[in-house]
Structures are given as C-alpha cells and as structure tokens.
Image: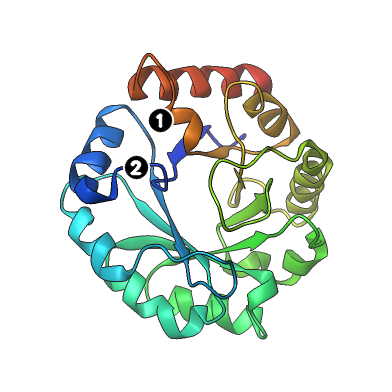
Amino acid sequence: MARPVMIAPSVLPADFSKLGEEVAALEAAGVDLIQWDVMDGQFVPNLTFGPDVIRSARQHCSVPFEAHLMVHTPDVMAENYVDAGCSRLIVHAEACTHLHRTCGNINELGASAAVALNPATPVSAVEHVLDLIDLVLVMTVNPGFGGQAYISTMEPKIAEVRTMLEAAGRADDVHIEVDGGIGPTTIAGAAAAGANVLIAGSALYRDPEGLEHAVSDLRARAEAARS
C-alpha cells in the first residue's frame, strides 16, 4: 500500500519572533507535521534552532515535530531534541561515523530515527540501517540555506530509494522524504519518483493566497502525480 502524501513545512522562512503563532498557523493550514532545520554552523554554514526554542513552540500545536539535524554531533545532541518534543530525528549519513549506532541510540530515546542523504551521497549509505529507521530523506538541494533551487537530477535517486525499500520489504514501513526547492512546479516530479513526505518552506510562505491554499495545492499536485 502506497504511503500517504504528507506536507511538512520547514519553519526557516517563518517569523522567528513569534514561532508559537507561526506553528499554530501551520497546523490550522492543514500540514501533517513540522520540520525544524537544526544547523550547527559547522556541518552547514548556518545556525538555527536550539532545543529550548523548539520546546517553547511545542505547546502551541499538536502536529508531530521532526528535527533535521544538520550537525556534526547528532549523538551528543539527540536527547535534548527528543526532550524538546521532536518525535523523529533525522541525521545525515555524512556526519555519522557509526550510523547504525546513532540510529539505534535515537530509537532507544523513544524517537523514530531517519537518515538524510546529501545530493552527492549514494543510496547505498542507508542500505544497512533500513531496519532501524522509518524515513529516508533525499536532499534535493545542498543543505544549509532555505530558498535554493530544486535539483531535478535527484529524482532518479528518489526512485532508487523506492526500489531499495521494495527489495528489502520495507516499502510500507519507511517514508521517503524530499527537502529542497519543493513548490508547485517541482513537487510532482518528486512525488512521481516515489517521495511521499514533501518538505516545503519558501513556497508555502510566498503563496499570495495564504498558507491554507499553499498546503492544499501542494497536496493535490503530489497526489495527482502519484495516482
């Protein structure tokens, strides 16, 4: 059975001075979950959200939170983000010396583990941890900044992840997520390739008809591409 389409905003384009109101507005607009792009200024050249910021926003909405840990030390930081209210932690294969151990540690903390793959990272990097994760994130930009252009050449890679999951008997249990440049003109390609969790940032916030229209429009386009 195909995994359902899920629209998940990145809050990077939000007004940081009122994040509680921002996450409440996203929930009201119909998003399925909210992603927090956690950057350490080392793995990527930017700094963003600490666990206390996420914890303060957690009380303002009920949709699940996931933390995309674009950091060099996910093992050190994981427990703080789980305690802050993130039910899924996404780590980068490129940042983890012992990826299997890192995923296991996240599961032991009571959260779901997931793995992100940068554009140049092969799908094989996640092949041997499929039993420990519930999501593979295929980056369709190089991580670190919002508003980047979608790399369409990642679509065969999304399809490759789908094929790998089918071969491993995990297609019904593991989501395929894409992050980077997702909007009205790009979401269909990602969804048709096999992605079911679509991260959108700038496209949601710049829709002249508002967040609710943006969410429903992206969902409709993704579902049409998968039908």
Q: Quadrant of the N terminus?
A: top right
Residue placed under numbered mark 1 in the picture? 205
Element type where label 1 sits in the image: helix
Q: In this picture, is 107 found above or below 176?
A: below
Q: Amino acid at mark 2?
A: Ala
Q: Is residue 100 left or right of residue 51?
A: right
Crowd tier of the residue under label 1, counting other residues whose Cα lies within 10 Å: few below 14, some 14–19, many 20 or above: some
Q: Is residue 113 left or right of residue 119?
A: left
Q: Amino acid at mark 1?
A: Tyr
Write down the quadrant of residue 212 in the picture: top left
Is disc 1 in contact with disc 2, using a CB cutoff of under 8 Å? Answer: yes
**Can the viewer see residue 227?**
no
Element type where label 2 sits in the image: loop
What scheme was used to colour the molecule?
rainbow
C-alpha separation, residue under disc 1 versus residue under disc 2: 8 Å
Residue furthest to the left in view is 59
**Can the viewer see residue 220?**
yes
Residue placed under numbered mark 2 in the picture? 14
Q: Nearer the viewer, residue 24 or 219?
A: 24
At x 62%, y 34%, the residue is 2
Write down the quadrant of residue 151 in the picture: top right
At x 37%, y 34%, the residue is 31
Residue 33, image x, y percentages: 38, 44
